[in-house]
């Protein structure tokens, strides 16, 4: 086969599905999420959580960029495959530098600059690959060039932030990401192409599963190599119940409704739905999962490390608010997804989010095990409530 044929780009069609290369690409994102959770765990303060969420926002923008690319062309065909492997390599380096994204460690390369440099290369590789995919589509080329209006100044601000520390560094990060995100949002969906809504929805569903997997990993890391006790075993099952409940709350209704709505839309309406429901509203969804993982990790550390933590010690401060606040954020994001796709809020999920936040000051005085049990009971009670016949009828009527 001639070289030109081997390196050509293949446009995705309506029946396009997730490829093994995309799943392989997601493995790097798994590690990146783990690094982000660890960054917050190592800097257990409100400032540390803010830094972790800012890093997550950067990682999310990288991942979303390639998810959109994968719904336009077959990324496992032709030269796009080489671009994906190149992006994977740089993305892995980006993940390795997450612990130094804000503060350089002595010796070696400059961590903050390396982080920003890797981020810039990942984004620019995406631009080049996407421009290649848009070689016969002037509208798509124009919208890709409009992306540079936000990307270039955003990268410049992040480079400047790498030379600073303290509040000004965080301010520049926030402004840089706001410039990039708002540029994409206000540029509108015109010009983007979403050839396979099923593929697109599946990509985001898989990344939710990956994030939920981090919460399970966090339980195991929190427990560590300690003898198993009945208390730890029971709480571990409750931790899995939290993850399972979060999976159920997303995939049982929300994911299917969003994909159905996306598949039924056409043209500009479809790309607008994809931008709102997936690119933007899935970010707080993932952030909520990451915060829950942080809370679970610390809760099980308190339960298992009896040398450094007294028996019955309560979660308090950042770990406690991460657990309940993360779950509340997840529920609010799910309700917002319902509002965008079905036109109505999920009232019971919003109510439960408020209840969790209201209970947090009380849970700060209860043993860590109680906090894990309460989180599990809360999400399982929600699932049980929504399985009642009248509640299911309401969901059915809203989806029609």
Image (cartoon, helix red, strand yellow):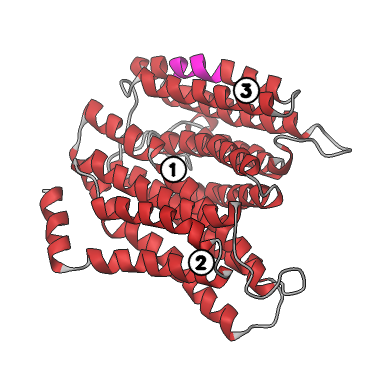
Mark 3 crowd level (few <14, some 14–19, many ≥20, 10 Å Cα): many
Q: 224 or 187, which is in the foreground?
A: 224
Query: Mark 1 sits on what residue?
Result: 284
Q: Residue furthest bottom?
A: 230
Q: Relative to residue 350, is residue 176 depicted above or below?
A: above
Say which quarter of the image contains residue 13.
top left
The numbered disc on residue 172 is 3
Q: Say which label, 2 or 3, has the lower sequence index.
A: 3
Q: 1 or 234, which is in the foreground?
A: 234
Disc 1, disc 3: CB below 8 Å?
no
Dominant secondary structure, magenta: helix
The question of residue 145 being in magenta is answered with yes
Q: Relative to residue 210, is residue 65 depicted above or below?
A: above
Q: Say which label, 2 or 1, has the lower sequence index.
A: 1
- Is residue 1 at all visible to an observer of this figure? no
Between the C-alphas of marks 1 and 3, the distance is: 21 Å
Please indicate whether residue 44 sits to the left or right of residue 14 in the image: right
Say which quarter of the image contains residue 69.
top left
Mark 1 crowd level (few <14, some 14–19, many ≥20, 10 Å Cα): some
The numbered disc on residue 371 is 2
Q: How many marks?
A: 3
Q: Which portion, as a residue range, is magenta? A: 144-152
Query: What residue is shown at x 47% (from left), y 73% (from top)?
Result: 238
């Amino acid at each position: 086969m001639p070289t030109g044929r081997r390196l050509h780009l293949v446009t995705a069609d309506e029946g396009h599905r997730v490829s093994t290369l995309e799943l392989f690409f997601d493995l790097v994102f798994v590690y990146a999420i783990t690094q982000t959770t660890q960054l917050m765990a190592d800097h257990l303060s409100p400032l540390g959580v803010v830094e972790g969420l800012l890093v997550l926002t950067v990682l999310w923008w990288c991942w979303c960029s390639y998810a959109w690319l994968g719904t336009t062309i077959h990324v496992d065909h032709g030269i796009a495959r080489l671009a994906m492997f190149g992006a994977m390599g740089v993305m892995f380096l980006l993940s390795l530098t997450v612990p130094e994204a804000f503060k350089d460690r002595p010796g070696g390369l400059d961590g903050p600059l390396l982080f920003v440099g890797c981020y810039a290369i990942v984004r620019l590789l995406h631009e080049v690959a996407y421009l290649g995919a848009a070689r016969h589509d002037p509208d798509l080329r124009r919208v890709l060039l409009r992306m540079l209006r936000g990307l270039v100044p955003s990268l410049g601000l992040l480079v400047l932030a790498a030379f600073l520390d303290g509040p000004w560094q965080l301010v520049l990060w926030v402004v840089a990401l706001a410039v990039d995100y708002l540029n994409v949002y206000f540029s509108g969906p015109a010009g983007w192409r979403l050839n396979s809504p099923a593929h697109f929805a599946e990509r985001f569903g898989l990344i939710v599963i990956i994030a939920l997997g981090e919460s399970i990993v966090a339980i195991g890391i929190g427990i560590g190599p300690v003898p198993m006790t009945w208390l730890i075993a029971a709480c571990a099952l409750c931790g899995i119940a939290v993850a399972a409940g979060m999976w159920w709350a997303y995939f049982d209704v929300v994911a299917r409704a969003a994909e159905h709505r996306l598949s039924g839309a056409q043209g500009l309406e479809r790309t607008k739905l994809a931008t709102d429901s997936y690119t933007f509203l899935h970010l707080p969804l993932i952030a909520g999962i990451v915060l829950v993982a942080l809370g679970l990790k610390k809760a099980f550390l308190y339960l298992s490390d009896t040398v450094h933590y007294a028996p019955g010690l309560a979660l308090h401060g950042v770990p406690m608010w991460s657990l309940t606040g993360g779950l509340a954020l997840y529920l609010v994001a799910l309700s917002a997804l319902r509002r965008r796709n079905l036109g109505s809020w999920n009232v019971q999920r919003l109510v439960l989010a408020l209840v969790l936040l209201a209970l947090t000051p009380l849970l700060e005085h209860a043993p860590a095990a109680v906090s894990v049990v309460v989180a599990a009971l809360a999400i399982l009670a929600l699932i049980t409530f929504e399985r009642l016949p009248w509640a299911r009828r309401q969901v059915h009527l809203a989806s029609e």
